[in-house]
Image (cartoon, rainbow, N blue to C red):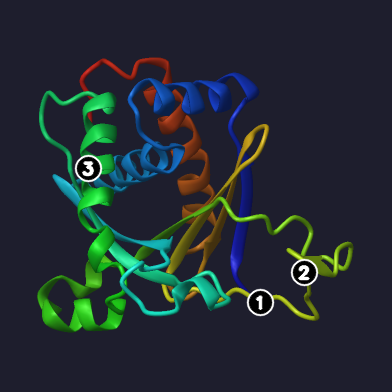
Amino acid sequence: ALIEHHRSLSPDHSAALVALARNLHATPSSVLHAAWGLFAAKYTGENEALFSSIVANRPQSLPGVERMMGLFINAVPVRISATTGATFADHIQTMQAQTLARADHEFLPLAQIIGAMPHVSAAFDSLLIVQNYPLGNVGTGETDELLGVKVREFKEQAHAPLTVTATLETKVALHFAALPDEYDPAMAHQIADGFVDFLSRLLDAPNAPVST
């Protein structure tokens, strides 16, 4: 069974995250991606981090895409460099630019990307999912309809040893799911608590140099 932990940001920090994204003309997703990348670099003692991210992109170049159902979900690589002297705000803007730059290439399968650079494949050991689509209570038995489509069963299965799912609600909710073969309970607990503390401190001082 997965090792799971649920955490959430305080209401004040959740509001600060949204406000920071708005002030930087970025998305809350870019704020969370920058924070997770910096935390991963700090946790592993490296100068950079490489992880996977889930995107839902409907390519306009695909004929008939407007008549197709589905979220067009794919996993793509995200890289962040813990540049000395850069502020959290700097990293968010870099992440936003990176997101826009890769938009035309988000259809490439992650397995194909990893296959093209086997020397770094082991670095894709975490996956960040930012949920913006309206799942509501689907899968809990409380709701059986999603956007007018009846949902009989809902399952999610990630490829990474550690999956972090952020849900943008009144408070930013965080769900950590770790494979027991890769993480022990104490380590998973430490990561969950550590990320919430790290992100909160970044939001308290977004224009201060980030120490990793």
Q: Nearer the viewer, residue 78 or 6?
A: 78
**Vertical order, 188 against 170 (above or below):** below
**Vertical order, 167 against 139 (above or below):** above
State how far apart marks 3 and 1 are (Cα): 32 Å
Q: Which amino acid does label 1 sit on?
A: Lys
Query: Quick check: marks 1 and 2 in contact, CB under 8 Å?
Result: yes
The numbered mark at residue 139 is 2
Residue 185 x/y as whole percent: 55, 59
Q: Which amino acid does label 2 sit on?
A: Gly
The numbered mark at residue 97 is 3
Residue 128 x/y as whole percent: 43, 56
Q: Name the residue under label 1.
A: 155
Q: Earlier in the sequence, mark 1 or mark 2?
A: 2
Count of numbered tags: 3
Q: What residue type is labelled 3?
A: Ala
8 vs 211, left or right, is right
